[in-house]
Amino acid sequence: MSGITKLSQKRPFSEDDDSFLNATSESDSEEEEEEEWIPKNKIARKPKKSTAKPMIAKRQVKSKAGSPGTKKTSVKRSPKKTAVKKNKKKTPEKTKVDPTVMGQPPVLNNNEDKLSLQIKQNFKNVEQMIPQPAIQIKKENEHCVVKVEQPSTSTHLDNRKIKEEPDVSFTWEEPALKKQKTENCPDGKPVKLQRGCVEIGETQMNWNITQVLSERTNTDAWACANVIRLFKEENTIPFIARYRKELTNNMDADTLREVQQTLEELTTVIKKAHTAIQKLAKEEKLTPFLNKALLNCQTVEEVEHVFAPYKSGSKKTKAQQARQLGLEPAANLLIDRPGELNLNNYIKANIKGLSNVGEIETGIQHILADMMSKDTETLNHVRKLCEQNVAFIQSTLTKATTKEKDGHKKDTEKFRLYHNFSCSIRNIHHHQILAINRGEKLKILTVKVSIPDRVKNEFCRWCVNERWRPRYFARPELMKLLKDSAEDSYKRLIYPLLCREFRSRLSTDAEKESVAMFGRNLRQLLLINPVRGRILMGIDPGFKHGCKISIISATGQILHTDVIYIHGPGAQREAEKIRHLLHKYSCSTIVIGNGTACRETESFFADLINRKYFAPLDVVYCITNEAGASIYSVSPEAAKEMPDLDPNIRSAVSIARRVQDPLAELVKIEPKHIGVGMYQHDVSQTLLKATLDSVVEECVSFVGVDINISSETLMRRIAGLNASRAKNIIEWREKNGPLINREQLKEVKGLGPKTFQQCAGFIRINPENIKNFCSNQQKSNNAAGGQLAAEAGSSSKAGGGGGATGKTSKKKGKSQGTSVHPNPLDQTCIHPESYNTAMRFLSFINGDLSDIGRPVMQCNVNAVLKTHSMEILAEKFATTVPTLQMIIDGLVQPHNYDIRAGFEQQDFKRNIVSLNDLKTGTVLTGRVENATLFGVFVDIGVGRSGLIPIRYITANKLPATTRRRSLGLGPGERVEVKVLEIDHTRNRISLDLIRVL
């Protein structure tokens, strides 16, 4: 391929062969032998204008390349080299380069070493070659790759001699996504992994990000490689989960989110390592040992451990002080050639640290301990030893807290379970870690990690006898020094590092699981089956300021608002008012918020219903979660939507709409205010917000949004859209009317091809709205035509108006010429990129677009699937099995299909049960209110939620369709429970899960 030359046919370069990157020329080898190689930031320079000199050089080289006798690439360099000193700016020097390197790969022969030397010489001055082509040399999979990039100033070169035909399937280090899907990997088979290491700037890590990502997320490496590419191309999680299943091995949204978070963590590690290397190089502190140690780091903690001694303001470590005294050669001699080591040769009586043999041994010990603590193999071995043994995390009450009086007694009582707590790191629960961290943050608890002493003993034995064993015989005093170094390294450096790693890993895992629990609960809450076709009365209960009520229509329109005072002497008068409103608006469903005075309000309505006070209406009520309603009622969105209503009344409207369409109403509220999950303020707020926003986007996209009736708040949650794009769609809709088909989205400002690709599959076009729009448009056109004719007649009478009339008619005809037709496929989940395949499949099964969602379509599809397998059909239509399945689902599903139909609805009831009615062993039916890492809270209708401890939630009690890795239940799920214990003093109810209904 043009521009790329592989020098791997003769001899692959080994990992230890650094001379390829460091060698320049024989005359300069001695001069630069002591200089360290420091990576430099490439500064973008403006290309200089071509002069006559480079043009002459190019013609000469071009004529040489055209000669038939040319067999290898010749790289000319300036015969005179400017001497380079440290801390001095290099003088740019033009160097002649043979353009045949760009157009033709050199033919390797026996003089390969000479060719390599020439390329090495050119590599040193590659940044000074302006406007000559730049050569990038990379080392990949033990092969050298030379990449030549043609600058923009070379356009005047004779294109007849050098022609580069673009290869549409070629992208640097990664194949094109579309070609990979349709040709290279049509059925989701393993694909070739990334060839090189991850690069950030000029830094190459010594590990492969795809492999590490695969190991940490427990997914296939080929799928991780595809996910990395998809995220790099700015694809959203809903789009990948639905329309790129073949590339991800059918990963669901949660798995994709986990991979994305882990990928961001690894990217952060790479950036931190790159920043550390740059800073050390700038301060001239970068050594090959430090460079390798930083490039081996796979966690942020490892980077901090290596870079901590070199941070600005940090004190010099003992190892740094010993190295400044010149004891590092002695430490190296102890390992490499211990027979030549004589400590007396390093004694300098007038220098502190070198005055006697004891101080010299201490300095060597510090250097060896530092080398051991930063050696990758040594750290991996001690981590393996910790896995084989049991480490404990312990928490105790701080001494300062024990001396406090009753002032902090209430706070310490919250953490009484952890006053003297000890648990193995393997068995500790996530909620226990979060509780311990909170207690430590409040300075109530003291936490430490305990590692068995046998880990230290085994580690020291391994260091002395295997990893750091001297290569030749060492005297007993030197072996004792080596053993002391291993013990010092473990006690002073490695043990604290292990403790930090354990605490960091446990805290990170606990945070991730807590955030994942938030996401699962939020998804379950958003996907509650809506109550459609009912007129609802929403009640925000209260005592002193009364109960705020609102009545909304079946479409969510506000019919009536009021305030009633039912918890006082005028309760009977208020009851008559409520009965009048229910009969006036034919409302038989009441929604009560679960806030203050909820229990009393529920009792009031239950008594009226039992007395049949609202007859002939059969009135029922339900309790719904009002978390976030008060915050939303004072938000700008609520003020814009309901400008004429008091904020207290707005909350009642929101409570009613939460039951009518939970998804459309809850997206108006910040996800963290909805009140699901645990330890909300103890986890990373950035991670929490990103996860919850992603879950909302996933739910909104998978349910689908009718673009013609959707609010701006709901529209901005569609995958690929944001606030500004949603606003542009609303403005386009107000100006041009409802959208007729998905293709019209391309006319909206700010919606480019990528945005259209991400959002089009999740947008629906309802044909009923199109019919209404067409009829309204026809009426408006007829009215406008009559008015136009009248104006034309009056203007003709006045005289001189004929020209204006002609122009108007011409403009009107132009607007009518561009007709837009609806597409029945826009009602389905089929993506526009698959419309051609869908039409060919319809033709194959003898179907018609008018039959979409009807039983006849299901019959036609079933008849074809009886004689053809999905694999054969996918091959026939040149697509993948997941894409074909998506097409079939879109054709078969009815027009009013909603994925929320399979989820639970609100529980409506007519009577109330009190806590005194419960007995141990009573079997009840309840609904999950909230799920945490230690148990599940269930609303059993007694005004107090009961707790199912996590130990009672086992896999055999959950249906196969709802089992998760955490064996969790989500809000809204109906369960059958048994009362285990009732604590009337603390109002606590312990439950046992019988089954999920």
Image (tube, helix red, strand yellow):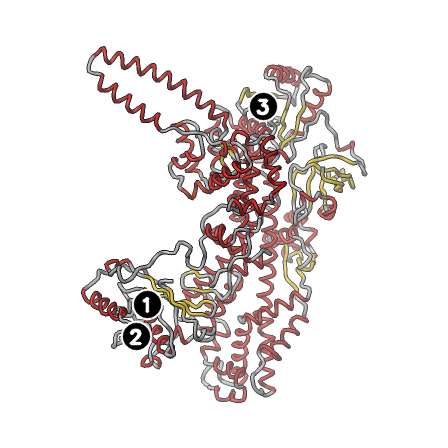
Q: Nearer the viewer, residue 138 or 41?
A: 138
> Mark 2 or mark 3, which is nearer the start of the sequence?
2
How busy is the neighbourhood of tag 2: few (under 14 within 10 Å), some, or many (20 plus)?
few
Taking the image as shown, residue 55 lies to the left or right of residue 893, namely left
Mark with earlier residue (3, 1): 1
Does the residue at mark 1 contact the one at mark 2 (Cβ under 8 Å)?
Answer: no
Question: Residue pushed farthest left?
Answer: 52
Callout 1 crowding tier (Cα within 10 Å): few <14, some 14–19, many ≥20: many
Q: Quadrant of residue 63?
A: bottom left
795 over 377 or under it: above or below: above
Report helix, strand or loop for mark 1: helix
Q: Amino acid at mark 2?
A: Val
Q: Percent from the top left, x then y, of residue 614?
A: 67, 17
Identify the disc placed on residue 84. 2
Is 978 drawn above or below residue 305 in the view shown? above
Identify the secondary structure beneath mark 2: loop
Residue at x 56% of width, y 34% of height: 663
Residue type beneath disc 3: Ile
* Quadrant for the C terminus in the image: top right
Q: Marks 3 and 2, how far apart in space?
A: 83 Å
Q: Is residue 806 left or right of residue 915?
A: left
